[in-house]
Image (tube, grey):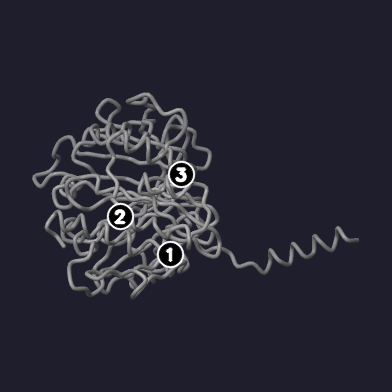
Amino acid sequence: MAENTLETTSDTASAEAPADPFPVLGMDAVVFAVGNAKQAAHYYSTAFGMTLVAYQGPENGCRETASYVLESGSARFVFTSVIRPTTPRGHALARHVAEHGDGVVDLAIEVPDARAAYAHAVAHGARGIEEPHELAGEGGTVVLAAIATYGETRHTLVQRTGFRGPYLPGFTAAAPLVTPPERPVFEAVDHCVGNVELGRMNEWVDFYRTVLGFTNMKEFVGDDIATEYSALMSKVVADGSRKVKFPINEPAPGKKKSQIDEYLEFYGGPGVQHVALTTDDIVRTVRVMRASGVEFLDVPGSYYDTLGSWVGDTRVPVDTLRELKILADRDEDGYLLQIFTKPVQDRPTVFFELIERHGSLGFGKGNFKALFEAIEREQARRGNL
């Protein structure tokens, strides 16, 4: 009798639960347009500890571009460059790199049904870039579609059901460029941050809520995210499972140029500012990456003098956090540890965050002032504050 009651309750709950209008399985890939994909692949192999797993280029039938696919845990980066012009104006990706520098052009999302996801998005106001189509190869079939988001960024919708090949049909498996680490340096993509123009943040937040069915997860405005000299505003949208999280930033009025203003100027418009990578051992990750030449933002020693009084105990002792310049924050759900690289190219645009979560679902609100002051010191060194 009790068993039947439980079944009825479960059925009722299922019937009452609203269907997710845009179900996602997670981030599929972060795709970069770069000037030299081979060199970029080598940099991320040696400096970030990623492993080359797939390749597409002239050797396997792609005459215009070369692409290298690197992985670390479930995180996947794809670096693509143009190898020859194909029209009088050149290839679109070559133009993009010339105008914006190396940067993210695609935040690809894995979905269970690319056709349904595309149809829902377009019906709710998205601009379609590629209608659903199949790619078939030895590993099976993948369904792809694509929609536009801020700037020249896109979301490719990837349906991989049953596919067993390397990355996508048309790619071949590739051997690592360097000896892979014994275990991943980082495990997954935590979130991807977009910078948009002044007054456009709410427009894009509404886009994700309306088009993709995402919800507003966090909001940072006013004194939350300001220093003496500059300010910005940020809202975080995420799918219902919190597997895909997209903070959206816009500049706010301040005495001097904010980091968002600097990004928009040097990138030439809105785009992806940074990618946060999840690690289960931030101390090891920082030591490995720093030894490989990755530069991190500096944090003054005074930040750590009172850290323990408000963050409390963490897995990593405060002395180690101080040594490695790792930040810590605590909220009602737990705590996190985080650190930010300097920009990874000559233009002060794309950088990375490393984050180790212990219950906290936040983004380091308690660190914003220290972080942005560190960024401002770098802006001042570049003459851009």
Image quarter (top left, top right, bottom left or bottom right) of the C terminus: bottom left
Q: How many labels sit on residues? A: 3
SS at mark 1?
strand
Any mark on residue 237, and which? 1
SS at mark 3?
loop
Q: Is residue 139 left or right of residue 275?
A: right
State the residue position of label 2.
Answer: 300
Residue 129's image quarter?
Answer: bottom left
Q: How much space separates mark 1 and mark 3, taking CA atoms?
A: 22 Å
Residue type at mark 2 is Pro
Residue type at mark 1 is Val
Image quarter (top left, top right, bottom left or bottom right) of the N terminus: bottom right
Residue type at mark 3 is Thr
Nearest-to-viewer mark from 1 and 3? 3
Query: Quick one: label 3 or label 2, which is nearer the N terminus?
Result: 3
Q: Position of residue 279 (x, y in %)?
A: 46, 44
Name the residue nearer the viewer: 13 or 90.
Answer: 13
Answer whether labels 2 and 1 touch (C-beta < 8 Å). Answer: no
Q: How much space separates mark 3 and mark 2, taking CA atoms?
A: 24 Å
State the residue position of label 3.
Answer: 279
The residue at 16%/60% (across/down) is 265
Q: Position of residue 316 (x, y in %)?
A: 48, 46
Nearest-to-viewer mark from 2 and 1? 2
Label 1: few (<14), some (14–19) or many (≥20) C-alpha neighbours in 10 Å: many
The residue at 71%/66% (across/down) is 13
Nearest-to-viewer mark from 3 and 2? 2
